[in-house]
Image (tube, grey):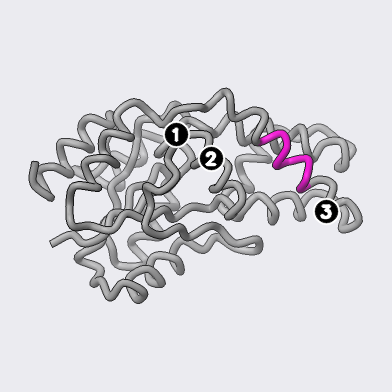
């Protein structure tokens, strides 16, 4: 029996990738003194936004760049004011079931607070495991949730869009349901790595979950 369903945030719950990239670029480029490519920025995703900023700017500029990031991030969130269509319906459905719902993301704690408020998803998650500054920590966060709630790996599902999400789940010994509906996702790779558990439409994930948990 499934006792917890955990979610990634960016490109899984909401179409926020381009917004995140732009917020980072606006905040960091004035301090870095150069133009950052999208590939360079996206390549740093996995650690949280504070760690990303510290990897690019000088220590004396950390505080100013971090403050600028959160200002830009909040301002740009008008570009992403709703979850992907159908996600809220799934979250409401999960609330009717005897399962815990968690968020396990590379995004930092303050970034999570901003996004959940902007999306109107405050209170939907029983627990939030944010990203770390210095390393990708999802493979650590998942076992921490299992231990905290005394849940076995077989009772846990993670929903995420990245190949690294699948790899983290394999390392933690839990099932990954691959969210393959965002434009930036490597759909072909997810379908290849996770056959039968990669979903190109939110509606297909909903059908799968209802088949697993009961309509």
Q: Is residue 105 left or right of residue 210?
A: right
Looking at the image, the residue that sits furthest to the top is: 79
Which residue appears at 40% of the width and 38% of the height?
13
Note whether 181 is above or below 135 in the view shown: above
Q: In this figure, which residue is indicated by the disc labeled 3?
A: 62
Tag 2 residue: 115
How far is the residue under mark 1 from the one under mark 2?
9 Å
Q: CA distance from mark 2 to mark 3?
A: 22 Å
| Residue 49: x %, y % from top left | 66, 49
Q: Would you identify the image quadrant in which residue 28 lies?
A: top right
Q: CA distance from mark 1 to mark 3?
A: 28 Å
The magenta stretch is: 66-73
Label 3 crowd bin: few (<14), some (14–19), many (20+), radius 10 Å: some
Crowding around mark 1 (Cα neighbors within 10 Å: few <14, some 14 to 19, many 20+) is some
| Magenta stretch encompasses residue 70 | yes
Horizontal and vertical percent position of residue 45: 59, 47
């Amino acid at each position: 029996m499934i006792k917890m369903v955990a979610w990634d945030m960016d490109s899984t719950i909401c179409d926020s990738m381009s917004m995140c990239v732009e917020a980072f670029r606006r905040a960091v480029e004035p301090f870095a003194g150069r133009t950052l490519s999208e590939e360079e920025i996206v390549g740093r995703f996995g650690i949280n936004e504070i760690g990303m900023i510290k990897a690019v700017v000088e220590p004396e500029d950390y505080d100013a760049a971090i403050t600028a990031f959160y200002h830009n991030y909040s301002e740009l969130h008008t570009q992403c004011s709703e979850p992907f269509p159908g996600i809220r319906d799934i979250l409401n459905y999960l609330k009717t079931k005897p399962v815990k719902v968690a968020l396990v993301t590379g995004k930092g704690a303050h970034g999570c607070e901003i996004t959940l408020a902007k999306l109107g998803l405050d209170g939907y998650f029983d627990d939030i495991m944010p990203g770390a500054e210095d390393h990708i920590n999802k493979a650590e966060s998942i076992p921490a949730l299992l231990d905290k709630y005394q849940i076995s790996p077989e009772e846990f599902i993670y929903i995420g869009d990245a190949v690294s999400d699948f790899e983290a789940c394999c390392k933690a010994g839990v099932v990954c349901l691959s969210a393959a509906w965002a434009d930036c996702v490597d759909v072909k790779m997810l379908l290849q790595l996770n056959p039968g558990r990669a979903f190109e439409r939110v509606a297909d994930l909903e059908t799968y979950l209802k088949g697993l948990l009961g309509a």
